[in-house]
Image (spheres, rainbow, N blue to C red):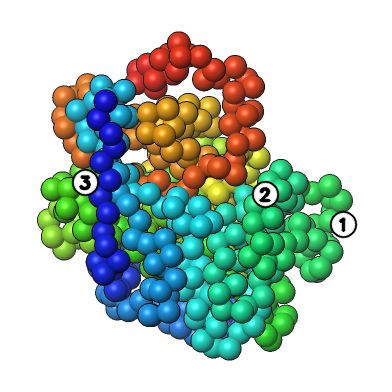
Amino acid sequence: MKTSKKINLNEKEMPGKWYNIQADMPNKIQPLLHPGTKQPIQPGDLEALFPLELIKQEMSPERFIEIPDQVADLYRIYRPTPVHRAYNLEKALDTPAKIYFKNESVSPPGSHKPNTAIPQAYYNYKQGIKKMTTETGAGQWGSALSFATNFFGIECKVFMVKVSFNQKPYRKSMMQLWNGSVIPSPSMETQAGRAFLAEDPNCPGSLGIAISEAIEVAATHDDTMYSLGSVLNHVMLHQTIIGLEAEKQMEMAGDFPDLIIGPFGGGSNFGGLSFPFLRHNFTGGKKTRCIAVEAASCPKLTKGKFEYDFGDTAGMTPLIPMYTLGHKFIPPEIHAGGLRYHGAGAIISQLLKDGLIEARSVDQQESFGAAVAFARTEGLIPAPETAHAIAQVIREAKIAREEGIAKTILFNFSGHGLLDMSAYDQYFSLGNGSTAAHQEALLGQLINA
Ligand SMILES: *Cc1c(COP(=O)(O)O)cnc(C)c1O
């Protein structure tokens, strides 16, 4: 058995700038519209919610943007992150494809999300902000922002979707550990929350509702700003540290990806890995295919419409030009909480509309099957979100086998599943994956699917 090959960068090789794809994408994104006037928003319209530097980044045409020293210092707690070659998975799948993954699960909160939480907390701190609000579904984003704000002495208030608040007690503890305060949403703290509770006292909540609550608190308090963990352009920008590192690591491995795959919630980890490679499609004659993998139960990219829609349920955010299932859509309660968002970021949506990236969907059963196969071959336990990308990797490895083509696949291992074991428990309790024979069948099934 060959052990996994791990490709590390040293700290000095960590990129000093983020990459802004807005400089190179062939068709620019349409402007955000003001929720009241429906006119293109002006930078000033966002000043109640975000610090100036982030608003500047949101609209910036600059190709590269400097990473501040204090941000880089905090990145070094867990960056650069390794790229691994998944030899054992390749062998189990009997595929000629080479499978690499970028391991973003090594951050303290366990996902890629601190890549943007750290700079967002930093720019708020630089502007003298003392409090930030946000929302979280499964708890990954809330824990990343608590982790980051804690370094800058900023108070962090997290509206957590009520079902997850009850289902994921350890994510809540993690936020508290890093000084975050966690409120189940919908709550009585906001007008939006009270309205949803009046309609349905047992409302389980949704990401869209929690966003409405967090925005309301920021908009009505001068000392408080709002923060979003995906979808927006500045979030994608910060996440490109993933792809910029991976570019160097693939070069060290002597390979270049034919295919890039990432799980898709609002687009930040997928964009973060793929944008620096797409740049070479736009300007360097490369032809890397980039595939975003969403949950079949929340299929905005594969079944949604491209139109202007709100980012939240109450209709308080600017209107975003995006693929969406409608801002009132409340997705089923799947384990991959990070994929339960009704829309996609504006940049991703434009790229998809222009046929420059692709999208696929994966259902929960197939994703857990892939996660178990991955844990048993490569050892790492994937987050339920990450499992969606792995399922697509397995599909592509099968196609490579049928075609006899040794293509190179790079996917984003966006997070670990160590706080999602109850989801694995449920998967096993249904009789899945419990014996070696079942696992054989599972891999076979995936291979022949
Ligand atoms: C939040 C999350 C996602 C999805 O969010 P994106 O903004 O689309 O990246 C994927 N994987 C993990 C582990 C997450 O925490």
Q: Depth-wise, is mark 1 or mark 2 nearer the camera?
A: 2
Q: Nearer the viewer, mark 1 or mark 3?
A: 3
Which residue is drawn at the image coordinates 16% and 29% (left, top)? 405
In the picture, the disc for residue 34 is: none
Residue type, mark 1 in image: Ala
Mark 1: give few (<14), some (14-19) or many (20+) Cα within 10 Å.
few
* Residue 353 visible in image: no
Q: Quadrant of the C terminus?
A: top left
Q: CA distance from mark 3 to mark 2?
A: 36 Å
Question: Where on the picture, by quarter, is residue 195?
Answer: bottom right
| 1 and 3 marks in contact (CB < 8 Å) | no
Relative to residue 182, is residue 329 drawn left or right?
left
The amino acid type found where label 3 is placed reads: Pro
Nearer to us in this view, 321 or 443: 443
Along the line of sight, the residue nearer the viewer: 307 or 218: 218
Percent x, y for residue 149?
58, 73
Cα distance, mark 1 to mark 2? Answer: 29 Å
- Does label 1 point to a residue whose CB lies under 8 Å from ligand 1? no
Residue at mark 1: 198
Mark 2, other Cα within 10 Å: few <14 / some 14–19 / many ≥20:
some
Badge count: 3
In percent of width and height, residue 9 lies at 26, 59
- Residue at horizontal 43%, vertical 38%? 380
Image point 75% across, 57% down: which residue? Answer: 185
Image point (47%, 48%), residue name: 415
Query: Is residue 327 positioned above or below 407 on the image?
Result: below
Q: Which image quadrant is residue 248 in?
A: bottom left
Q: Give how far across and how far down residue 446 sits, in percent.
A: 39, 22
* Residue 407 location (% of width, % of height): 19, 36
Residue tagged by mark 3?
257
State the residue position of label 2: 170
